Image: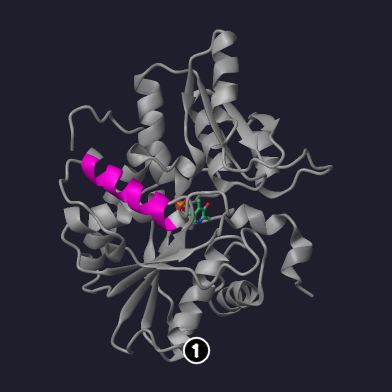
């Protein structure tokens, strides 16, 4: 790593557990299924953003900033974890959240408010588009703001997942196992980019399968392009001279349904099956969709029975307690 990378700030309880999903493996009679519990990273109901925030907030503290700004959807897990981390580090937190202020505070939004985050409602913009404006405003007020991009997905944040590869490789070796595949939700790209770079850095021969979550808008840069660029920036930032091409990335686009945050039948089946067979909660936006992808791939014989597939649970549980009518649980 470059010397310019600052000390990370410990925020989570790492390593997170990894264990076998015996009932689900039996039920599908396919590959052995394991799960990596980043829903248990520890900070304020957990989630994958903690790994990125350890590096990002380390940098904010190193630069003596006193206010964090980030953005996302109203039910953003990233914003909730950022708000909690800000509280833990004595920093102000500003969140640019898409939509209008709702009449009741549910799920992640309720938690954002408990952590004392200042919320800026940004209407149609749910990907942090207004962060620069808010940053200028905070500077005018004499604050020293630190900008965390949408999803915490820049090369510094992605380092959290470069290092997560070492964590899982060590765990796998001590379990005497050999994962053939890791499958996970891929949305702003930092998790995926970090995994790809970490896989090469730590010589881990595993197939990485990202399930795309958000189809985005027509005017936006296609996600695969954003992801490829972020992967190359992350490689460069972590001192590698490898150049990645689109063929190096597996991104499944078949599970987008009606788009981001709209629960479809496969998402719902995945949430219900994982809850009822394993007692494990998935979320309605990311991990439900990623598990739906895994189930579909098993049914399509993508894996052999000798494969050992790791489902990386990226968190998101608080969103289960919002928009509950979408979940259609009777
Ligand atoms: C943010 C998030 C993801 C996606 O991670 P990216 O690094 O943004 O691709 C997956 N699952 C959950 C629960 C998340 O909050």
Give the answer, above or below, for where 306 lies relative to 264.
Answer: below
Q: Which residue is mark 1?
A: 27
Give the residue at x 17% y 41%.
239
Give the residue at x 39% y 45%.
51
Tell which residue pokes out farthest to the right in this image. Answer: 103
Give the residue at x 53% y 49%.
220
In which image quadrant can residue 133 be found? top right
Q: Magenta region: which residues?
A: 224-236
Residue 246 visible somewhere in the drawing = yes
Query: For this rendering, which residue is in front, 284 or 39?
Result: 284
Query: For this rendering, which residue is in front, 289 or 39?
Result: 289
Give the residue at x 24% y 46%.
235
In-image side of 8 versus 236 (left or right): right
Q: Is residue 230 magenta?
A: yes
Q: Is residue 273 magenta?
A: no
Secondary structure predominantly adopted by residues drawn in magenta? helix
Q: Residues within 10 Å of mark 1 (few under 14, many from 20)?
A: few
Query: For this rendering, which residue is in front, 70 or 132?
Result: 132
Give the answer, above or below, for where 13 lies relative to 168.
Answer: above
In-image side of 190 versus 324 (left or right): left
Residue at disc 1, CB closer than 8 Å to ligand 1: no
Colour scheme shown: one colour
Give the answer, above or below, for where 286 lies relative to 20.
Answer: above
Q: Which element carries disc 1, helix, strand or loop?
A: helix
Please state the horizontal and vertical placement of residue 49, each as a whole percent of the image: 46, 46
Please state the horizontal and vertical placement of residue 316, each as a whole percent of the image: 56, 55
Q: Quadrant of the N terminus?
A: top left
């Amino acid at each position: 790593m470059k010397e310019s990378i600052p000390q990370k700030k410990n925020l989570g309880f790492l390593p997170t557990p990894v264990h076998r999903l015996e009932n689900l493996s039996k039920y599908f009679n396919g590959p052995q299924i394991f799960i990596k519990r980043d829903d248990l990273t520890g900070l304020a109901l957990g989630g994958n953003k903690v790994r990125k925030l350890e590096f990002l907030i380390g940098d904010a503290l190193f630069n003596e900033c006193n206010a964090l700004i980030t953005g996302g959807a109203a039910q953003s897990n990233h914003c909730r974890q950022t708000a909690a981390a800000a509280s833990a580090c004595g920093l102000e937190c500003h969140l640019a959240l898409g939509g209008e202020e709702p009449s009741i505070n549910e799920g992640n939004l309720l938690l954002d408010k408990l952590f004392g985050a200042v919320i800026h409602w940004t209407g149609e913009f749910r990907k942090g588009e207004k962060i620069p404006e808010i940053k200028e405003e905070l500077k005018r007020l004499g604050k020293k703001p630190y900008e965390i991009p949408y999803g915490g997905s820049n090369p510094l944040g992605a380092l959290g997942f470069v290092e997560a590869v070492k964590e899982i490789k060590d765990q796998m070796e001590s379990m005497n196992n050999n994962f053939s595949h890791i499958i996970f939700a891929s949305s702003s790209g930092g998790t995926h980019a970090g995994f790809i770079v970490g896989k090469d850095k730590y010589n881990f021969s595993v197939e990485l399968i990202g399930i795309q979550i958000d189809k985005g808008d027509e005017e936006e840069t296609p996600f695969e392009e954003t992801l490829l660029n972020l992967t190359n920036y992350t490689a460069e930032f972590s001192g590698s001279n490898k150049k990645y091409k689109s063929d190096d990335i597996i991104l499944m686009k078949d599970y987008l349904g009606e788009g981001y945050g709209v629960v479809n039948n496969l998402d719902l089946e995945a949430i219900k099956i994982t809850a009822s067979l394993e007692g494990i909660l998935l979320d309605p936006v990311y991990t439900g969709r990623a598990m739906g992808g895994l189930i579909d791939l098993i049914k399509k014989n993508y894996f052999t029975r000798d494969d050992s597939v790791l489902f990386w649970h990226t968190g998101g549980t608080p969103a289960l307690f919002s928009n509950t009518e979408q979940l259609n649980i009777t």
